[in-house]
Image (tube, grey):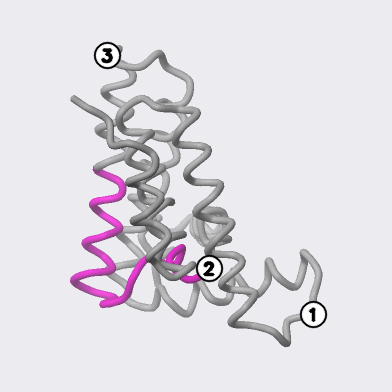
Amino acid sequence: MARLPTTVINKVLDRLDRRTRGVALTVGGMGALMTGGKATAIGLLSKGLKDIEAEWRAQHPDFQGGVRERWQHAIEFYEQTHQDPTNRKLHIVGIPIIVGGTTGLLIWPRYTPPWFLSAGAFGFGWALNFVGHGLYEKNAPAFADDPLSFVAGPIWDLMHLKQVLKRGGDPMAAAA
């Protein structure tokens, strides 16, 4: 398969506003990871998340907090954008699958059986999350507006799951 010249890609990206470009680069990074391009994936994800964060800062000019306050804002935003119980359940299942799939895609040599299993897990986990947002929550994934959601989301879900398991409850109750 022929590769698009970098100049063509740059011309397209330059026509997009910063947030849209950031989301496109982030999604492109996920796509690159699915094709085995580990360094390319990390580069695209980094650039995309940097653009989304710059746009977030531009949209919040009054924000003066440090890392702790920024983190708290990301957690609150994530919770606000994940209110539907079915979407939460899909995320409690999907996010650990994504994290496991991502780990496998990064550590296994590409195109080996464990790498393919990781790619399937990665894609399946994202499919669960997209179904949750598209059919139930009716909004875009949180990372499209707040790049810290890539980290805040899994931690938020893990915190809720841990609380429920500590009480001896049903893991799906973490979605409530």
| SS category of the residue bearing label 1 | loop
Q: Quadrant of residue 171?
A: bottom left
Placement of the C terminus among the 4 image quadrants: bottom left
Residue hosting label 1: 64
Q: First in sequence: mark 2 or mark 3?
A: 3
Position of 126 relative to 117 (above/below): below
Tell me residue 47's x, y (percent).
54, 49
Is residue 151 rendered to the left or right of residue 27?
A: right
Tell me residue 73's x, y (percent).
64, 75
Please tell me whether residue 100 belongs to the stretch shown in magenta: no
Tell me residue 170's x, y (percent).
38, 57
Q: Is any atom of residue 163 visible in this view?
A: no
Question: Label 3: how many residues lie within 10 Å, few (<14), some (14-19) or many (20+)?
Answer: few
Is residue 32 rendered to the left or right of residue 123?
A: right
Q: Amino acid at mark 2?
A: Asp
Disc 2 to disc 3: CB gap under 8 Å: no
Q: Amino acid at mark 1?
A: Gln
**Who's the residue at 40% across and 13% down the image?**
109
Q: Quadrant of residue 82?
A: bottom left
Residue hosting label 2: 146
Dominant secondary structure (helix, strand or loop) of the stretch shown in magenta: helix
Residue hosting label 3: 113
Disc 2 to disc 1: CB gap under 8 Å: no
Name the residue nearer the viewer: 104 or 58. Answer: 58
Q: First in sequence: mark 2 or mark 1?
A: 1
Q: Amino acid at mark 3?
A: Pro
Q: Quadrant of residue 92?
A: bottom left
Position of 146 relative to 92 (above/below): below
| SS category of the residue bearing label 2 | loop
- What segment is highlighted magenta in the picture? 124-146
Is residue 23 rendered to the left or right of residue 48?
A: left
